């Protein structure tokens, strides 16, 4: 049976007529061509240069080690903050497959807050959970909803109007 002037045969028929060495060579050659095309034409990731330190000793799939176990996690993060975050106010670590950026000082936190709630937002999964619990009010709002609520509640929540601990 021919279509467009090409004799159509199944792969099994084609490979059965070749000897084993030719089959192996053609498979290897085809694999190399695929690998080369993925390498050349594949999407290239940009490596972002950053100025904050990373916690060393990252294990594949497990992330950074918590010396003393998970029960000691608060002490581990405080130790990392003093070792890696004291200078820049931020450090990077991995917990399992999640990359975490830990802020260690008020200046970095204020810098991050200046981008909320438009450029820096919660993940969609967290927003769905909040909505599912029915807690999507004033303190969980983001974007345009937050902007409208802010005009209403902003003056009452101003630091000058809220006394510490009262």
Image (tube, helix red, strand yellow):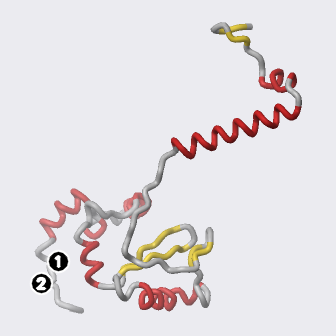
Mark number displayed over residue 85: none
The vertical placement of 85 against 12, above or below, is: below
Q: Name the element at disc 2.
A: loop
The foreground one among 128 and 124 is 124
Q: Is residue 131 left or right of residue 54?
A: left
Q: What x and y, as percent, mark residue 150?
A: 17, 67
Residue 160, position in %: x, y? 11, 85
Tell me which residue sits at (31%, 64%) in the image. Answer: 120
Q: Is residue 166 left or right of residue 12?
A: left
What residue do we see at 77% from left, 17% from top? 9
Instruction: Using the image, tell me which numbered label, if any, was put on residue 161.
Output: 2
Residue 17, how many percent across, how many down?
Answer: 86, 22
The residue that label 1 is drawn on is 157
Is residue 18 left or right of 60 when viewed as pictured?
right
Q: Compared to 7, does 108 lie above or below? A: below
The residues tagged by marks 2 and 1 sit, at their Cα atoms, a distance apart of: 7 Å
Whether pointer 2 and pointer 1 mark residues with C-beta atoms closer than 8 Å, the reply is: yes
Q: Nearer the viewer, residue 117 or 136?
A: 117
Residue at x 83%, y 26% (from the top left corner)? 15
For the N terminus, the quadrant is top right
Q: Secondary structure at mark 1?
A: loop
Disc 1 residue crowd, few under 14, some 14–19, many 20+, Cα 10 Å? few
């Amino acid at each position: 049976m021919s279509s467009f002037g090409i004799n159509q045969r199944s792969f099994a028929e084609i490979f059965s007529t070749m000897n084993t060495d030719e089959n192996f060579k053609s498979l290897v050659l085809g694999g190399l061509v695929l690998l080369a095309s993925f390498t050349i034409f594949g999407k290239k990731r940009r490596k972002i240069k950053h100025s904050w330190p990373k916690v060393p000793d990252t294990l594949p799939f497990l992330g950074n080690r918590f010396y003393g176990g998970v029960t000691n996690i608060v002490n581990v993060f405080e130790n990392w903050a003093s070792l890696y975050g004291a200078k820049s106010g931020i450090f990077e670590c991995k917990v399992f497959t999640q990359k975490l950026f830990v802020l260690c000082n008020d200046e970095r936190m204020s810098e991050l807050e200046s981008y909320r709630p438009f450029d820096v937002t919660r993940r969609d999964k967290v927003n769905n959970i909040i909505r599912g619990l029915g807690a999507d009010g004033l303190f969980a709002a983001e974007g345009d909803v937050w902007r409208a609520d802010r005009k209403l509640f902003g003056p009452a929540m101003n630091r000058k109007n809220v006394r510490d601990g009262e």
